[in-house]
Image (tube, grey):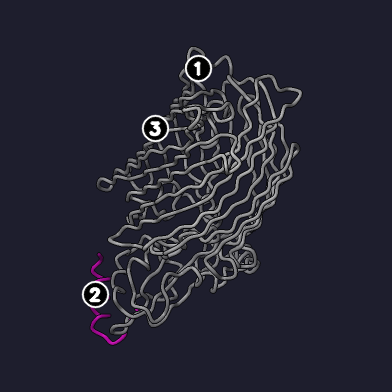
């Protein structure tokens, strides 16, 4: 803690009233700077809450004080004060609780219409405190695009999104996507605070060249660790043309119609001894229907109806840390360091219109280990699937384990390593383990191998540059190496261990919502070279570095 700040605090405590920071300097404050300031609000009565809704561009910065940025600030409609106020976990007249102030800051930082948020005591008067809620707006209107090529297949998308419609926090998107020979037009709207309540809603519709997709949700999630109840509901239908690929060759194709709906109620006693335990009960319905096309060669998967009633629990530890340059570029990130456990268990009886009776199980455990200032390890395991009681066999049960390791060389350089292992039991052909977008192997097509076992490992050297192009674009660089394999006992001799090396650039705008990171990667396969291109080039947007 700096001697100047200690002197300021001593002076504040000795006076009837004292201001801890100048409101004219709010643009210069940093959410990682002087985190201990919040502690001095503990136990004092909140007499006033001041809202500072910062523009997208800082006109007090000479590099951003130009005609273009001033015009964009005028065109952009900042988030309304009531939208921010509705998210607070505290109010005027209450005694300040540090845990609630810190959690509110963390929850605000998750909002797609904010680039950052921080909460500080602004003025102390004896036993009362005035709290400053400072938020930085994102640029609401975004043009999105991506291009990828792997194994001769290309995928492109272009879209427009308003992430903060008229400053209300509502989201509206329109996307055009071409992937695997299919065209898709997607419209989606989200309301994260329905009529100023804790309820949220979303609706989406997609018209594809081979079918359509529909989505409706109405939720009241556990909005804080101390909230006492939740409600979740969803209804969705998708109709897609699926291609079965193996070793860069399409073996078969078919239509798949999928329907999913659920209703979930949750209850909790809130945050007790730094932990919260939540209990759930729900009804879930899933339907999968498969239809032949002229190019269907292999046997179709069986149609499935899986309706089940279930109970579950979740246990979450209130232990979070603030970091920078982990998954985002030069932005504050809140990473859970404590344990998180989720379990559920359900029954699917014939009386629920199931074609087979089954038991459904689902679980996930995650934890983290932080050693000193240079090492962070996150690890966990998960499982999900069914057990058919009459057949005495598993159905689409997948058990997996993962570990992610970060080594901080300095503030702007990281070594990153990851390892994931999965094993499937009773997998239907549409659920076989492969290399999908979330389990990307950069030198090979997404469905290059399939099976009931999967190995994925990567090592990266990441560099987060301080470059701030035009005061808008943050830049990063990565060198990477991947190894992967998906196989089962029938194709083990054909499924070689895959490997690739490559490099990439990362681009993230400091003025748009957190989570948009453009990946420009060039990967060179080191195995199975005769079956894939010498280089794989991709340009896509992801949620992480």
Residue 246 in the image, given as x and y percentages of width and height: 59, 21
Where residue 419 is drawn, which disc sits there?
3
| First in residue order: circle 3 vs circle 2 | 2
Where residue 235 is drawn, which disc sits there?
none
Q: Are marks 1 and 3 in contact (CB under 8 Å)?
A: no
Residue 318 in the image, given as x and y percentages of width and height: 33, 57
Crowding near the residue tagged with mark 3, few <14, some 14–19, many ≥20 C-alpha atoms within 10 Å: some
| First in residue order: circle 1 vs circle 3 | 3
Q: The N terminus appears in which quarter of the rendering?
A: bottom left
- Identify the residue shown where x is 57% and y is 55%: 233
Q: Which residues are magenta?
A: 1-19
Residue 164 in the image, given as x and y percentages of width and height: 61, 62
Q: Nearer the viewer, mark 3 or mark 2?
A: 3
Q: Is residue 238 left or right of residue 325?
A: right
Real-space Cα separation, disc 3 to disc 2, in angstroms:
49 Å
**Residue 329 seen in the current view:** yes
| Residue topped by disc 1 | 495
| Residue topped by disc 2 | 7
Between residues 278 and 194, which one lies in front from this camera angle? 278
The secondary structure that dominates the magenta segment is helix
């Amino acid at each position: 803690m700096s001697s100047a700040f200690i002197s300021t605090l001593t002076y504040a405590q000795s006076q009837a009233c004292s201001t801890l920071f100048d409101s004219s300097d709010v643009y210069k404050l940093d959410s990682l700077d002087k985190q201990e300031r919040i502690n001095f609000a503990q136990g004092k009565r909140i007499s006033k809450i001041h809202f500072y809704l910062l523009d997208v561009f800082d006109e007090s910065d000479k590099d951003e004080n130009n005609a273009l940025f001033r015009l964009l600030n005028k065109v952009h409609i900042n988030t309304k004060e009531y939208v921010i106020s509705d998210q607070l976990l505290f109010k005027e007249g209450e005694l300040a609780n540090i845990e609630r102030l810190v959690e509110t800051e963390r929850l605000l930082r998750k909002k797609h219409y904010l680039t950052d948020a921080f909460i500080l005591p602004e003025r102390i008067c004896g036993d009362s405190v005035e709290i400053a809620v400072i938020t930085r707006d994102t640029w609401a209107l975004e043009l999105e695009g991506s291009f990828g090529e792997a194994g001769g297949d290309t995928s492109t998308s272009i879209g427009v999104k308003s992430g903060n419609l008229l400053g209300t926090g509502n989201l509206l998107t329109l996307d055009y996507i071409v992937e695997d020979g299919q065209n898709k037009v997607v419209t989606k709207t989200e309301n994260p605070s329905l009529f100023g309540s804790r309820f949220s809603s979303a609706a989406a519709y997609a018209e594809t060249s081979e079918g359509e997709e529909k989505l409706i949700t109405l939720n009241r999630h556990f909005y804080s660790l101390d909230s006492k109840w939740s409600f979740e509901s969803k209804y969705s239908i998708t109709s897609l043309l699926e291609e079965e690929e193996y070793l860069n060759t399409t073996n078969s194709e078919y239509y798949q119609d999928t329907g999913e709906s659920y209703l979930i109620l949750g209850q909790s006693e809130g945050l007790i001894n730094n932990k919260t335990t939540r209990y759930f009960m729900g009804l879930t319905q899933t339907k999968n229907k498969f239809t032949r096309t002229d190019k269907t060669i292999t046997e179709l998967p069986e149609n499935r109806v899986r309706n089940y009633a279930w109970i579950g629990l979740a246990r979450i530890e209130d232990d979070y840390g603030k970091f920078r340059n982990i998954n985002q570029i030069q932005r504050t990130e809140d990473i859970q360091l404590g344990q998180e456990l989720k379990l559920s268990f359900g029954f699917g009886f014939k009386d629920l219109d199931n074609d087979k009776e089954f038991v459904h199980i689902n679980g996930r455990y995650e934890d983290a280990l932080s050693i000193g200032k240079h090492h962070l390890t996150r690890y966990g395991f998960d499982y999900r699937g069914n057990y058919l009681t009459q057949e005495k066999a598993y159905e689409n049960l997948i058990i997996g384990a993962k570990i992610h390791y970060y080594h901080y060389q300095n503030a702007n350089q990281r070594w990153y390593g990851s390892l994931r292992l999965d094993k499937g039991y009773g997998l239907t052909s549409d659920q076989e383990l492969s290399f999908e977008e979330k389990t990307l192997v950069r030198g090979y097509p997404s469905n290059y191998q399939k099976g009931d076992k999967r190995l994925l490992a990567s090592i990266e050297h990441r560099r987060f540059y301080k470059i701030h192009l035009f005061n808008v674009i943050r830049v990063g660089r990565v060198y990477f190496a991947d190894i992967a394999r998906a196989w089962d006992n029938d194709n083990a001799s054909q499924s070689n261990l895959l490997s690739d090396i490559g490099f990439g650039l990362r681009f993230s705008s400091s003025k748009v919502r957190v989570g948009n990171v453009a990946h420009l990667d060039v990967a060179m396969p080191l195995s199975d070279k005769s079956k894939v291109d010498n280089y794989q080039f991709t340009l896509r947007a992801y949620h992480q570095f």
